[in-house]
Structures are given as C-alpha cells and as structure tokens.
Amino acid sequence: MRIRVHVIPGSKQTLLEPGDPMRAHVHAKPVDGKANDELLHLISSHFGVRSSAVRIVSGRTSRDKVLDIELPKGTTPEEQ
C-alpha cells in the first residue's frame, strides 16, 4: 500500500493526522535522518507492522513523502 505524508518536524508531540496526505507531526529535527526514522516508527505502529515493512519511496529530504507499507498477507488497509 502506498500513502502520501506531509511531515512536520520539530513538533512538541508525535502524532498522525488522517487525510490525503496524512500529516505526521514528529518531535525529531530533520538532522541525520532522525525525523525520517521517527516517521517510519510512527507509521509502522499506526498500521501495526514492523518498522522494516515501511519504506520511503520518494521525498527522503522533503517534507512531502510517499511511503510504501508492506501489509501482512491477507490484510486490507481498511482492516488496519
């Protein structure tokens, strides 16, 4: 499954807002990939998958990203 995410680094709290694109508030600053790491952890816990099942397809250095999420076999996004 692919999703679009707009990342807001340096936020006071880490949270995910629904929408298209989703808005991800992450506490980490965009230094040394820390904000991306926190984003991947946030998305993986939201969808109930391991962190390695989420990868950035495009936008690694941008606030607007496209993520690929590998869902467990036999699961649909609506079930997540």
Image: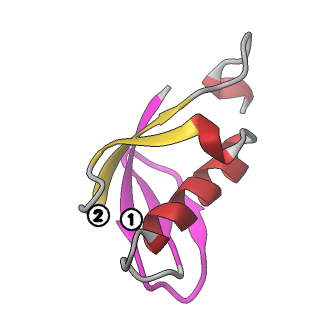
Q: CA distance from mark 1 to mark 2?
A: 5 Å
Q: Compare residues 53 and 20 and report the one nearer the observer.
A: 53
Residue 10: name its quadrant: bottom left
Say if the magenta span includes residue 17.
yes
Residue 33: name its quadrant: bottom left
| In the displayed structure image, the side of residue 47 where residue 33 appears, left or right | left
Which residue is found at the position 71% from the left and 51% from the top? 45
Residue that carries the numbered disc 1 in the rendered image? 7
Marks 1 and 2 in Cβ contact (< 8 Å): yes
In the displayed structure, 46 sits above or below 62; it is above
Which residue is found at the position 45% from the left and 63% from the top? 36
Q: Percent x, y for residue 70?
A: 59, 27
Give the quarter of the figure containing the C terminus.
Answer: top right
In the rendered image, the residue lying farthest to the bottom is: 12
The disc labelled 2 sits on which kind of residue?
Answer: Arg
Which residue is found at the position 44% from the left and 60% from the top? 23
Residue that carries the numbered disc 2 in the rendered image? 63
| In the displayed structure image, the side of residue 37 where residue 64 appears, left or right | left
Which residue is found at the position 38% from the left and 65% from the top? 7
In the rendered image, the residue lying farthest to the top is: 74
Q: Compare residues 23 and 34 and report the one nearer the observer.
A: 34
In the displayed structure, 8 sits above or below 24; it is below
| In the displayed structure image, the side of residue 66 where residue 18 appears, left or right | right
For mark 1, give the secondary structure: strand
- Range of magenta residues: 2-26
